[in-house]
Image: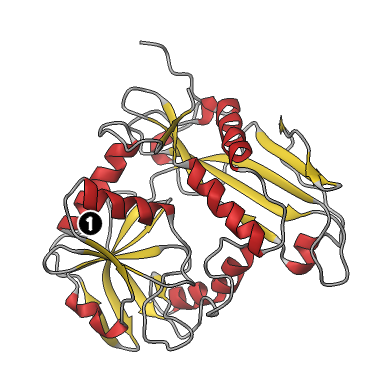
């Protein structure tokens, strides 16, 4: 078997944090078009003090992973979907489009340049990729900038769950995550800035995360600060909240496909009322970092709005969803067409 060259890193003890790698991708938008882009070793960003990103928060980002499969291929999971979502975000923020084919090519280039930082199969670690774009030229009047920079950096990260999944406790938040006709459906940096106070406050109160409700009626479940919800009914139907202010999670859409086409379960995307939560037997958060995070309780101002009906941290259906999707990602289960982008 071909020898796998990796960095001298203690992969099994990695946390989920930033570790600078050798190479990153950079492309600049100027005079109405993007340059060819290139791989660089320079990890610094130099900006005007009046750059649009600093003055008016004109910035967006994506997140995805590269990893080694069971047969030692280096792959990414559905990078075309990240590209499409960034395009939607850029349109809403009046930022220039970075074309889907260029986005995927930039991901491939970044991973290839950092192959030695892709953790070995079975370590539980992955190479996290952060594509992002920001306004780089100076602005003072409130308007879109004229110049932008698109970058991708990579950082090896450990498994989200150390020692296995633990069920988390959420609170129903008094803060709103997104306005009805705002930016909740795109991955703008400003959405995450406004969620920071809410999550710090939740932690101070002893909760792991916030459950945000729709800001118009405050009766329907939307998402947390950085993940979508999946619920399982008593008859094993998989439900996910529907709203035009929810960020369309790639993991969530993949899990719903897996539920229906791999596990033969009924699925539904619909509005979910806060008052019906205790009718569900399982609840989980879904996202790139952990795939699925089991929820043990949801507390609504001192009352239990949801309590997991499972004796294990991760419920039966949630576990099947997790095992199937990670099996697809790691090459142990055949993937749907175009879900796996082979890098090497």
Q: Quadrant of residue 311?
A: bottom left
- Up the image or down, 194 lies above or below 304; here it is above
Q: Residues within 10 Å of mark 1 (few under 14, many from 20)?
A: many
What residue is drawn where x is 31% and y is 82%?
Answer: 274
> Looking at the image, what colour scheme do you see?
secondary structure
Instruction: Indicate left or right for 111 with 294 as reference.
Output: right
Position of 93 compared to 338: left or right? right
Which of the two residues, 185 or 130, is positioned nearer the viewer here? 185
Image quadrant where residue 269 sits: bottom left
Disc 1 element: helix
Q: Residue at x 27, y 65 (%)?
A: 268
Q: Quadrant of the N terminus?
A: top left
Whole-percent x, y for residue 82 in the image: 52, 48
Total numbered labels placed on residues in the image: 1
Viewer-nearest residue: 145 or 41: 145
Q: Is residue 321 visible?
A: no
Residue 206, compared with residue 120, is above or below; it is below
Residue shown at 23%/53% (left/top)?
259
Inspect this view and state whether residue 150 appears: yes
On the image, the x and y values in percent for residue 247 come to 48, 64
For image coordinates 40% across by 24% down, the residue present is: 73
Name the residue that disc number 1 marks.
318
Residue in front for this viewpoint, 274 or 99: 99
Q: Residue 329: x, y in percent?
A: 34, 38
Extreme-top residue of the structure: 1
- Please state the horizontal and vertical placement of residue 40, each as a whole percent of the image: 72, 32
């Amino acid at each position: 078997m071909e020898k796998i060259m990796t960095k001298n890193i203690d992969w099994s003890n990695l946390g989920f944090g930033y570790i600078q790698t050798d190479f990153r991708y950079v492309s600049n938008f100027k005079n109405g078009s993007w340059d060819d882009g290139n791989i660089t070793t320079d990890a610094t960003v130099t900006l005007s003090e009046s750059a649009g990103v600093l003055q008016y928060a004109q910035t967006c980002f994506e997140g995805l992973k590269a990893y080694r499969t069971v047969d030692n291929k280096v792959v990414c999971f559905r990078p075309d979907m990240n590209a499409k979502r960034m395009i939607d975000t850029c349109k809403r923020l009046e930022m220039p489009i970075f074309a889907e084919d260029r986005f995927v090519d930039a991901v491939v280039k970044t991973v290839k340049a950092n192959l030695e930082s892709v953790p070995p199969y079975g370590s539980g670690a992955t190479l996290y990729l952060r594509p992002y774009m920001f306004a780089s030229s100076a602005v003072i009047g409130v308007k879109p900038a004229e110049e932008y920079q698109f970058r991708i950096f990579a950082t090896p990260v450990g498994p989200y769950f150390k020692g296995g999944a633990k069920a988390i406790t959420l609170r129903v938040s008094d803060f709103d995550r997104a306005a009805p006709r705002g930016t909740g459906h795109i991955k703008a940096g400003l959405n995450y800035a406004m969620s920071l106070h809410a999550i710090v406050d939740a932690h101070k109160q002893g909760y792991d995360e916030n459950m945000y409700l729709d800001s118009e009626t405050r009766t329907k479940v939307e998402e947390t600060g950085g993940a979508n919800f999946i619920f399982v009914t008593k008859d094993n139907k998989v439900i996910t909240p529907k709203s035009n202010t929810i960020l369309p999670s790639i993991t969530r859409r993949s899990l719903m496909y897996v539920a229906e086409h791999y596990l033969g379960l009924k699925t539904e995307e619909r509005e979910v009322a806060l008052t019906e939560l205790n009718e569900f037997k399982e609840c989980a958060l879904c996202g790139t970092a952990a795939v699925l995070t089991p929820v043990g309780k949801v507390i609504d101002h001192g009352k239990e709005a949801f309590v997991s009906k499972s004796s294990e941290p991760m419920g039966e259906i949630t576990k099947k969803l997790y095992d199937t999707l990670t099996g697809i990602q790691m090459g142990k289960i055949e993937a749907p067409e175009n879900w796996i982008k082979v890098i090497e």
